[in-house]
Amino acid sequence: MGFLHGKRALITGIASQRSIAWGIANAMHREGAQLAFTYPNERMKDRVDEAANAFGSNIVLPCDVADDAQIENLFVELGKHWDGLDILVHSIGFAPREAIQGQYLDNLTRENFTIAHDISSYSLAALSKAARPMMAGRNGSILTLTYLGAERALSNYNVMGLAKASLEANVRYLAFNLGPETTRVNAISAGPIKTLAAAGIANFRKMLDHVEENAPLRRSVTIDEVGNVGAFLCSDLASGITGEVTYVDAGYNTIG
Ligand code: 0WD
């Protein structure tokens, strides 16, 4: 029996089979969790249907996190399928493409700053708040994805680094707020992985090469490696861990 047997997990952020959320869904499914999925717009629906099929789920619900009504409606609809929720996976990030190339100040505008923070950080708190009634008192777990650019000024990551710093603070405040009702909140700081979101970052290949040459393991990580840690963090095996950022980056963050 898998270590997530009997758990119900809502997975956001699947855009393709390369998505980190796909790796997380795969590991959670293998460990016995029941899964439900969200898609942000009609264009992405087929991809997410494909994921649901692959993981034996028939719960696929719309949710663009830029829209309060869709966030609210998501949990109304989910409540028609499930009477409680154990796991919420937030694997969502976005910044306007011009903001994640060149130098930080080159394309920094109030609008780019706001969008990056809204979609990449506020959405974690908004989803957690809306999920709260379904998650309280069940030893539930919320998981998000962050990146080293939250702590270090990295080329091209720019305003996304600020949004990820906000996201990591969000993890700590949510963990502090939701701990008394037994819900844990954690982040994985993943090393660079070639996904659709990563393709938007200028010189992504160069970042990947640098990690592969310099990380202690002399390679990058896979979505399955991130998925395994995600499944662990959302399981009762990790019942003492909350408010943390766990690195799955082949050790890259530990070198100077
Ligand atoms: O190297 C990487 N790929 C890393 C990614 C390293 C460390 C962290 N991360 C983070 C990302 O910043 C993001 O938070 O992991 C998370 C997942 O990213 P991913 O798996 O790399 O990227 P992708 O497969 O593109 O999934 C991100 C998805 C979106 O995909 P697109 O390509 O359509 O932007 O986030 C979702 C969407 O499915 N998304 C939204 N979902 C709901 N509402 C929205 C939205 N408004 N915007 C984007």
Image (cartoon, rainbow, N blue to C red):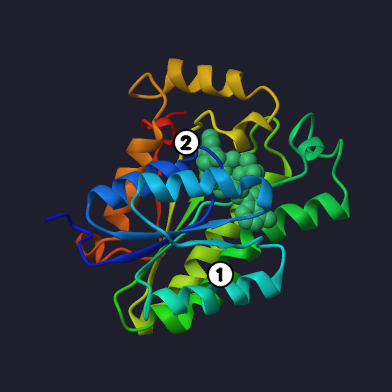
The residue closer to the viewer here, 239 or 9, is 9
Residue that badge 1 annotates: 127
Mark 1 lies on a secondary structure that is helix
The residue closer to the viewer here, 76 or 196, is 76
Q: Residue lying furthest left in this view? A: 1
| Place of residue 39 in the rendered image (x, y in percent of width and height, measured from the top left) | 58, 54
Counting labels gives 2
Considering only order in the chain, which callout, 1 or 2, is on the residue closer to the N terminus? 2
| Place of residue 198 in the rendered image (x, y in percent of width and height, measured from the top left) | 60, 33
Task: Bin the neighbour count of mark 1 within 10 Å (Cα to Cα): few under 14, some 14-19, many 20 and up.
Answer: many
Whether 46 is drawn above or below 33: the answer is above
Whether 203 is drawn above or below 242: the answer is above
| Place of residue 50 in the rendered image (x, y in percent of width and height, measured from the top left) | 47, 44
Mark 2 lies on a secondary structure that is loop
The residue closer to the viewer here, 62 or 71, is 62
Q: Quadrant of residue 135?
A: bottom left
The residue closer to the viewer here, 181 or 3, is 3
On residue 17, the disc is: 2
